[in-house]
Amino acid sequence: MTLAKRIIPCLDVKDGRVVKGIHFVKLKDAGNPVELASRYRDEGADELVFLDITASPEKRKIMKNIVRSVARELDIPFTVGGGIRSADDAREILSNGADKVAINTKAIENPSLVTEIADRFGQQCCVVAIDAKRAGGNDSQSSKNGKQFEIYSYGARKATGIDALEWAKRVEGLGAGELLVTSIDRDGTQRGYDIELTRSMCDSVNIPVIASGGCGKLEHFTEVFQAANADAALAASIFHYQEYSVPNVKSYLKEKGILVRI
Amino acid sequence: MTKIGILDYGVGNLYSLKVALEKLGVQPITTSSLVSRNDYDGLILPGVGNFSRVTRSLGRTKDFLVDWVKDSNPLLGVCLGMQLFFESSEEGPGDGLALFSGKVRKLPSNMKIPHIGWNLLRTRRESRLLEGLGNDSWVYFVHSFYPEPTDKQIVVAETDYGVDFASVITSETKQIYGTQFHPEKSGIAGERILKNFVAMCRN
């Protein structure tokens, strides 16, 4: 099998600017979305994910224009998420140049939306984003209890009481084409991906899993591919602030024997 | 200016394909009904949708496409668009265009499905469509089904995903070209493939 592991820079966008926070809060400015998107494409990013973190109806228009300008620059796949409430919202994002849409809160409130998007636009463009947190606030890799990871909605603000692995299996059955799994505990900390969370997700479903949250070092990528078997790794901070470039990451992974597109 | 028609089945993202063609100096014409052959120098069947639904919705367009190919006008099928060249699909009932004999099959169930991501083209023979590409080029796939042509001569490149499947097919004499991946999403390699197709439309 010669499928490459994917490296996906993520742009969190607020009021037309790229921002990055820690545990979903304490936002810092990280640049212009179109400029960053072009830079990542030139560097050899495998895909780009764009999350509108302050999606609200009045800001939708600004976002639509940004999606369009970014899509124009890209000859790699492009996923857009944030504030997608209906299949018509999805259609609007797709017709402005996105290849996939990521849904999160609305999928939890109305799971049939997953099926509706998959049926209308194809399973391949329906990404379900899952924000998961260790139950009991315990961020040790070895915590063991029945309900280990709980999913949150509204940008990690609202606990749902739903078990993350059960949810993953459910949305797979509903028609999700990919899962974007973010560890709330690790988001922005640069302490490494939650390996246990990612691995149990990969073991639970038969669709690709994109790991997210916590990447801060080159070794974190190796770990998430080798120990957790993720199909793709998403990262924001380490790319935005130019600690590492996409080529740095890829040549490192190649050296470690991981198949990447170079 | 070269004019290339993109058949719109009513779903999905045609924007990237349009932009990619514009960057090559082509005028893309998105249309849901093909009427006059003189309107286009080449046609593209894009990559989104469901086999059964699209074959049902094609209606008369099927006859147009069959005639188009009979006169050796250039036709490029991308992903589902390429699968439509065959007779039938395991995705569901419905008759394809039957431009080639063969069937569209589901990827092996021991693999993650859909097959999503960058995978390698293993070139099996020379073709104008892949001119200028090396032997192993990375291209972007997103699909759950793949074509299995009866005539192996049309297979230009294969890709390994639990099975070696035909990822590029061409018939130079008939001017029919197909890619299972998305050239408009495949960076520089994809741009080169589209450029090669455009060059054939200009002939």
Image (spheres, grey):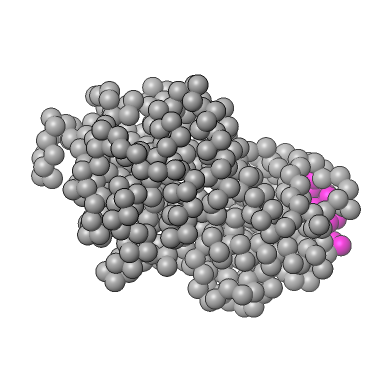
Q: How many marks are shown on the rendered structure?
A: 0
Foreground of the two, B126 or A101: A101
Residue B120 placement, left or right of A144:
right
Above or below residue B29? Residue B161 is: below
Could you tell me what secondary structure mostly forms the magenta stretch?
Answer: helix
Give the residue displayed 49% in from the left and 25% down from the top: A59
Residue A31 visible (yes or no): yes
Q: Provide residue A176's location: percent of width, then percent of height.
A: 44, 39
- Residue B68 shown in magenta: yes
Q: Provide residue A211's location: percent of width, then percent of height.
A: 31, 47
Foreground of the two, B103 or B21: B21
Q: Provide residue B83's location: percent of width, then percent of height.
A: 64, 55
- Residue A31 shown in magenta: no
Q: Provide residue A102's location: percent of width, then percent of height.
A: 44, 37
Q: Image quarter for residue A160? A: top left
Above or below residue A244? Residue A195 is: above
Foreground of the two, B197 or B161: B197
Quadrant in the picture for the C terminus of chain A: bottom left
Quadrant in the picture for the N terminus of chain A: bottom left
Give the residue displayed 42% in from the left and 65% down from the top: A261
Q: Image quarter for residue A87? A: top right
Write down the region rendered in magenta. B61-71
Give the residue displayed 47% in from the left and 39% down from the top: A80
Residue A235 visible (yes or no): no
Above or below residue B136? Residue B190 is: above
Give the residue displayed 43% in from the left and 27% down from the top: A55
Above or below residue A44? Residue B35 is: above
